[in-house]
Amino acid sequence: PGDAYILRSGGGGGYGPPLDRDLDRLERDVRGGYVSREAAENLYGAAFRADGRIDREASARRRDEMRRKGLPADQPIAETMAPPLHAHEHAYAAEKLTEEERTVLAMSCRCCS
C-alpha cells in the first residue's frame, strides 16, 4: 500500500547515439509519427527539405556541428512524488482524493499527462 510503479520508456529511436541513427529509418519513423520532426532535428541532427524529406548533406553538416558542441544533451526525468492535483476540472472531486488515488489518477489521466 502506498507504493507506485511508474515506467517511462524512450521514444524507440534505436540503439546507440542519436547522431548515428540511420537517416532512412529516422525519416520513416518521422513519417509514421514515432519521432516528431522537432525531435528529429534537435536530438538526431536531421535537416529537412521543403518537401518534408531529410536532406542527407545538410544533416551531415548539422550532425558534425552538434558533435562539436557535445549535443544532444541528456535530459533526465526525476520525479520522486505524485504530481500535484490538476489545475482544471474533471468529473470527480479531486480535493477528496487520497495520495494513492492521486498517484493512480496521475498515471491514468490522458488529458493532462
Image (cartoon, rainbow, N blue to C red):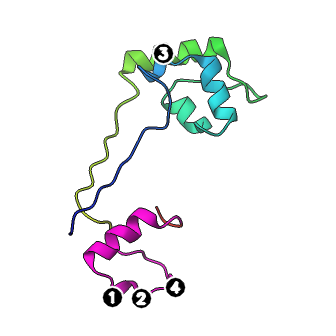
Sequence order check: which comes first, mark 3 or mark 1?
Answer: 3
Classify 94 as above or below 105. Answer: below
Q: CA distance from mark 2 to mark 4?
A: 7 Å
Looking at the image, residue 73 lies above or below residue 20: below
- Amino acid found under the numbered disc labelled 3: Asp
Q: Position of residue 110 (x, y in %)?
A: 52, 64
At x 79%, y 28%, the residue is 51
Instruction: Give percent across and percent down for residue 95.
Output: 34, 86
Residue located at (58% from left, 36% from top):
35
- Check disc 3 and report the residue beneath it: 20
Give the magenta range.
84-110
Q: Which residue is mark 4?
A: 91
Q: CA distance from mark 3 to mark 2?
A: 49 Å
Horizontal side, residue 48 vs residue 97: left or right:
right
- Residue 68 is situated, as x and y percent measured from the top left of the image, at 39, 15
Locate residue 11 relative to residue 51 in the image: left or right.
left
- Marks 2 and 1, how far apart at CA: 6 Å
Mark number displayed over residue 96: 1
Is residue 12 at all visible to an observer of this figure? yes
**Residue on which the image places disc 2:** 93
Label 4's element?
Answer: loop
CB under 8 Å between discs 2 and 1: yes
Residue depicted at 41% across the width and 16% down the height: 67
